[in-house]
Amino acid sequence: MKNLVIFGAPGSGKGTQSDLLVQKYGFDHISTGDVLRAEIKAGTELGNTAKQYIDNGQLIPDALMIDILAATYDALPKTQGVIFDGFPRTIPQADALKAMLAERGTAVHAMLELSVPDEMLMERLINRGKTSGRADDNEETIAKRLSVYHAQTAPLVEWYAQEGIHNPVQGYGSLEDINANLCVVIDAL
Ligand code: ATP
Ligand code: MG
């Protein structure tokens, strides 16, 4: 069982690389963004709340997000391990994840950071917006998401470095090369 956090700014490729890792290793995958978008699509009360934050480029409040994460995690089969994609996004979320896994007798074994320059992220997300249908993939909201990332999420790099499990990987170039570099880290665990 290997629990991995795949980390990076909006548009850094967390979802794409997670899919490749799921295929190769058989991990379970929790994408909090996907969970929230499914709630929005289903028109649930949680979805309606989440939509107001997401469309505005903001993060969902920690207390709510932590409950959603725990419920999603507990519903998984957890055989090979779990990839956490899009969680944690704040220091309180990282503390909560650590505590939640400790209560269940496990831990995060590696944080994999996809590093990509902001100009590239901006370009990728504007392009994605042309086909994604995501209300948050427009220039104004993307700029807000990047600034929220730098203010609230990027400090987790230092947090995980202190835990001794931060692994930076270049997040641009070919998908195969990025994937191969992630696999080197995972295979060494
Ligand atoms: P990527 O393109 O790398 O997958 P992303 O930033 O486009 O990343 P998602 O992870 O899909 O997006 O998240 C979309 C939105 O959902 C976020 O901008 C935020 O509003 C909300 N969200 C997702 N995860 C969290 C979280 N852990 N805490 C708070 N809000 C979250
Ligand atoms: Mg995603």
Image: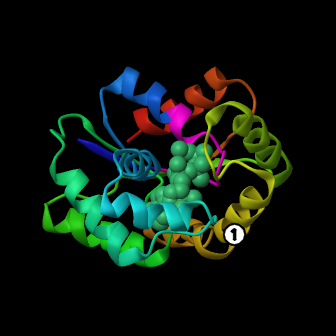
* Identity of the residue furthest to the right in this view: 119
Find residue 101 and report its image quarter. Answer: bottom left
Q: Is residue 75 left or right of residue 125?
A: left
Q: Residue at x 23, y 41 (%)?
A: 1
Q: Position of residue 135 (x, y in %)?
A: 63, 49
Residue assigned mark 1? 150
From what the image shows, is residue 43 above or below residue 171? Answer: below
Q: Is residue 70 magenta?
A: no
Of 125 and 179, the residue lying toward us: 125
What are the residue bounds of the magenta stretch? 6-17
Is the C terminus in the top left, top right, bottom left or bottom right quadrant? top left
Q: Which kind of residue does numbered mark 1 sit on?
A: His
Q: Nearer the viewer, residue 16 or 157?
A: 16
Q: Is residue 13 magenta?
A: yes
Q: Is residue 28 above or below residue 57?
A: above
Visible in this render: residue 66?
Answer: yes
| Percent x, y of residue 57 | 63, 64
The x and y percentages for residue 60 are: 46, 69
Say which of 144 and 15 sits in front.
Answer: 144
Label 1: how many Cα within 10 Å (few below 14, some 14–19, many 20+): few
Tell me where residue 19 sits by quadrant: top left
Picture quadrant of residue 158: bottom right
Image position, residue 56 (x, y; %): 63, 66
Q: SS for tag 1?
A: helix
Residue at horizontal 60%, vertical 60%?
Answer: 55
The answer to whether residue 102 is left or right of residue 148 is: left
Q: How many marks?
A: 1
Residue visible at 33% across and 56% down?
A: 108
Q: Is residue 164 visible?
A: no
In this view, the residue farthest toward the front is 43
